[in-house]
Amino acid sequence: MPRMPTVPTIKYLINQFLVFFKSYWWVPIGLIGAAIFYFISSGKKKLILEMFNEKKKLAEEELSAAKHAYEEEIKINKAYNGALEKLAKKQNKSIKEIERQHKEKLLEVAIENRGQKDKMAKELAERYGLKYDP
């Protein structure tokens, strides 16, 4: 049968606990403070995670839009270079000569038709006597 602790033993253990608590009072206070902070901030964690996920989604959308714009720019540049090559062959001149000769006109057409690549290609084809195939 197990032995019951005696009164002096219980007093001794309580005394040892109080000595420990006097020496290291900051340990239980810190643990209680950490527990309180954890339970108070647990609701805010969800909000912060949602905010970061929304920012991540917006950043991905911006990146895909920039990538799409870059691909469109490449297509426009290829069409422009192709039209210049055809014009150069037709007029028996180099591409640089044609660019120098028609630089101002090309800039005006590009500014007027910004964002409308089909209209720009059609206008350039009509202006320089080329055939436009959409």
Image (tube, grey):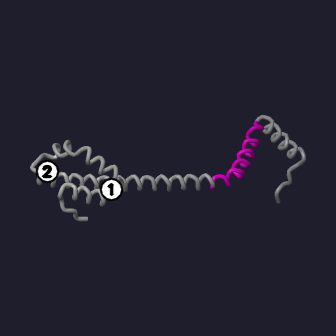
Seen from the viewer's position, the closer of residues 48 and 100 is: 100
- Residue farthest along the left direction in this orientation: 92
Q: Would residue 41 appear left or right of 104 to someone viewing this image?
A: right
What secondary structure is the stretch in magenta mostly built from? Answer: helix
Which sits in the foreground, 54 or 45? 54
Residue visible at 63% across and 54% down in the picture: 47
Residue 56 highlighted magenta (yes or no): no
What amino acid is found at the position of numbered circle 1 in the picture? Glu
Residue sitting at x 61%, y 52%: 48
Quadrant occupied by the N terminus: bottom right
Amino acid at the residue labelled 2: Ala
**Residue at (26%, 60%) from the top-left corner?**
122
Extreme residue toward the bottom, this view: 134
Given residues 120 and 64, the one toward you in this image is 120
Q: Position of residue 102 (x, y in %)?
A: 21, 46
**Which residue is label 1 attached to?**
72
Determine if the magenta segment contains residue 31. Answer: yes
Say whether residue 61 is left or right of residue 39: left
Name the residue beneath numbered marker 2: 88
Q: Which residues are magenta?
A: 24-46
